[in-house]
Each structure stands twice: as C-alpha cells, then as structure tokens.
Amino acid sequence: MDNQSIFQYSWEILPKKWVHKMKRSEHGNRSYTNTDYPFPLLGFLKWHTYTRVQVSIDICGVDHPSRKRRFEVVHNLLSTRYNSRIHVQTSADEVTRISPVVSLFPSAGRWEREVWDMSGVSSINHPDLRRISTDYGFEGHPLRKDFPLSGYVEVRYDDLEKRVVSEPIEMTQEFRYFDFASPWEQRSHG
C-alpha cells in the first residue's frame, strides 16, 4: 500500500470528530485533530492493518503567539511496513492539556516531557512529567516566543563557594562610541 492509498483510506475510514483536516505531501501525510483525540487517533494508526505505525520519531511543540490556540503539538510517526511518514498535529492554548500517548509508544514519554519542559504544554496524567532539558529550578519555558533571549537568571561557577550558583541576570553596558563612517566612503577619487 503506497502513501497515497494510506492517505485516501485514512480519510475515508477515520471518524470526522478525530480528524478535521488532512493534507498530503511528498514528505508524508498530515492529520489535524483537537486535544481530545490524539490518543485514539494514534492508537488507530498503530494497530490498523493498513497503517501499522510502529515508531514515534518525535513530538515537537511549536509556539504561535498570535493565534488563540497558540501551541501546536506535532507527533511525527513512521510506518516501516508501508514506508510512510504520518504527522498528527493538534493545537492547544496555555491551559489546555493534551492526552499522553506514552502507553502506545514508550519512547513518547521522553518527547512529551521535552514538549512540556521547553514549550509548557502539559499532558493529562503523564506518568513522569518533570523537567528533562533544563534545571529543576528553571523558571519558564525557553522555546516560547515570549521568553526573554537572555533568560531570567545567569548560572556561573563561584570559586569562593566551590559550586555553581544562580543569580538574577544583570545586564549592564558601559557607554561606547560607535564610528559609523565607512573607511571606503572617506577615500578621495583623485
């Protein structure tokens, strides 16, 4: 079964409340669902005879601050049997929690933790939802567009205390003179 057939079959057989839109491209099929249905949709894609998705490649969190539901969570899946990639995409706001898929794909536990740690999108009843890429005392979520580029604290090694210390960030800059004149424009043409 080729990628086009899987796309057509999935669109015809899946309940419309699970998938409200599908797109096909040379990079794989993309299904759009709401926050209540990623688990049943991914369960269908894993266990159905004509899809047989065996691998959850990763889960990504994308921030679109101008949207009402500003976060997108994208599950990137692979069917090795049919050599096809399927992307399942859902949107959430800052308070909406998504259903975890760690019971379907054990590797998804790590990716769901990373989506929560970096973007702030949490999962309902996740078995191990704690920080994975940042410190436990870290404030905020660094992949959000409203997170400051410099962060909130700076981390440095203190020789006196012989340990790593966190301090509020202090951004001071001395007055500097910038010469914006180009050396090529000052050259005489004679």
Image: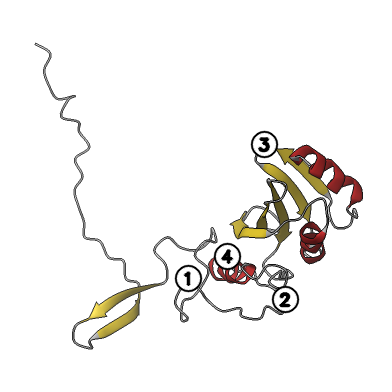
Can you tell which quarter of the image residue 92 is in? Answer: bottom right
Q: Distance between the residues labelled 4 and 3?
A: 28 Å
Looking at the image, is mark 2 or mark 4 earlier in the sequence? 4
Can you tell which quarter of the image residue 48 is in? Answer: bottom right
Amino acid type of the residue that numbered disc 2 sits on in the rendered structure: Ile
Residues at circles 2 and 4 in contact by the CB criterion of under 8 Å: no
Disc number for residue 124: 2
In front of the other: label 3 or label 2? 3
Disc number for residue 119: 4
Residue at image location 76% in from the left, 60% down from the top: 46
Residues at circles 2 and 1 in contact by the CB criterion of under 8 Å: no
- Which residue matches tag 1? 133
Q: In this view, does 116 lie to the left or right of 187?
A: right
- Which residue matches tag 3? 26
Residue at image location 77% in from the left, 52% down from the top: 32
Q: Which residue lies furthest to the front in this view?
A: 81
Amino acid type of the residue that numbered disc 4 sits on in the rendered structure: Ser
Amino acid type of the residue that numbered disc 1 sits on in the rendered structure: Ser
In front of the other: label 4 or label 3? 3
Residue 4 image offset from top left, x and y in percent: 78, 38
Helix, strand or loop for disc 4: helix
Quadrant holding the N terminus: top right
Q: Which of 95 and 114 is in front in this view?
A: 114
